[in-house]
Amino acid sequence: MPPELTNAPLFPFAVLFGVLGILVVIAALYSFFRLRIPQSGIRMAVGLLLLVLGALAGTISVGMMGYRAFTREEVAARISVTPAGKQRFLATFRFTDGREATYDLAGDSIYVDAHILKWHPYANMIGLHTAYEIDRVAGRYHAVKDERDAMRTVHALGREKPVDLYSLRQRFTFLSPLIDAEYGSASFIPVTRPAELELRVSTSGLLMRETKAPATK
């Protein structure tokens, strides 16, 4: 089991509610076979409610995999950009979790966007805080005509996950009292020469800026 999952704030609740739910359902079945129908019905309802709560906590825990919580501005990635021809360049990302990847991009600027999951205040009380996931990188042209007609390049930066909380929130409005996924953010910067960039994220969004010193691996 990934440590990222077991360290999730709601994971203990998922296990607790799941175990309690199973025990209560077993007790309900025991009461049913002893012909204690009213008692069996109450226990079954409580057991199913606990299982639903456990499933919800587990779903949120799995969905948060790949997201990083933050409460202030922090570095999300360091990027090395190198021109490779007219309106072409290479971008090497070094993420804070140790991953490194290089992408071939077409355009005049490097463009990066992210998904922001903003939990409502009462969710903060159980350890769920605003979190982000870098979603994609693309090449961006200065001229609108080039955006329409020239080569388009885009690469996914987020990791595949069994549950996509961002997409679920956009599809199901009943989750709105718990989480806000309407908030996305993007940043871009021209690439005219080799440079080292820092991609920073804060509660107000993404910011990309050139660093004076080369980024280290």
Image: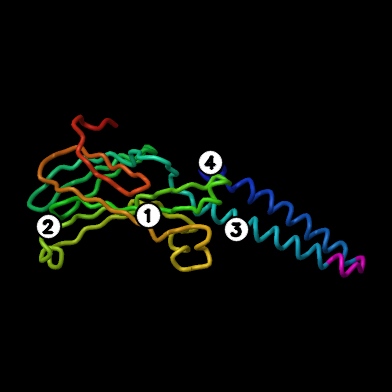
Residue depicted at x 78% and y 57%? 24
Apparent side of residue 39 relative to residue 51 in the rendered image (left or right): right
Residue pointed to by mark 1: 115
3 or 4: tag closer to the N-terminus: 4
Residue depicted at x 10% and y 66%? 145
Q: Is residue 141 above or below residue 203?
A: below
4 or 1: tag closer to the N-terminus: 4
Q: In the image, residue 52 lies at what x, y percent?
A: 65, 61
Quadrant where the N terminus sits is top right
Q: Residues within 10 Å of mark 4 (few under 14, many from 20)?
A: few
Q: Nearer the viewer, residue 4 or 50?
A: 50
Q: Secondary structure at mark 3?
A: helix
Residue pointed to by mark 4: 3
User: Amino acid under label 4?
Assistant: Pro
Q: Is residue 80 above or below residue 151?
A: above
Residue pointed to by mark 3: 56
User: Amino acid under label 2?
Assistant: His
| Residue 50 sits inside the magenta stretch | no
Q: Which mark is residue 206?
A: none
Q: In the image, residue 87 lies at what x, y percent?
A: 10, 53
Cα distance in 3D space between marks 3 and 4: 19 Å
Cα distance in 3D space between marks 4 and 2: 43 Å
Magenta residues (range): 34-40
Q: Nearer the viewer, residue 155 or 141?
A: 141
- Is disc 1 in contact with disc 3, using a CB cutoff of under 8 Å? no
Q: In the image, residue 197 lies at what x, y percent?
A: 22, 39
Q: Nearer the viewer, mark 4 or mark 2?
A: 2
Q: Which mark is residue 142?
A: 2
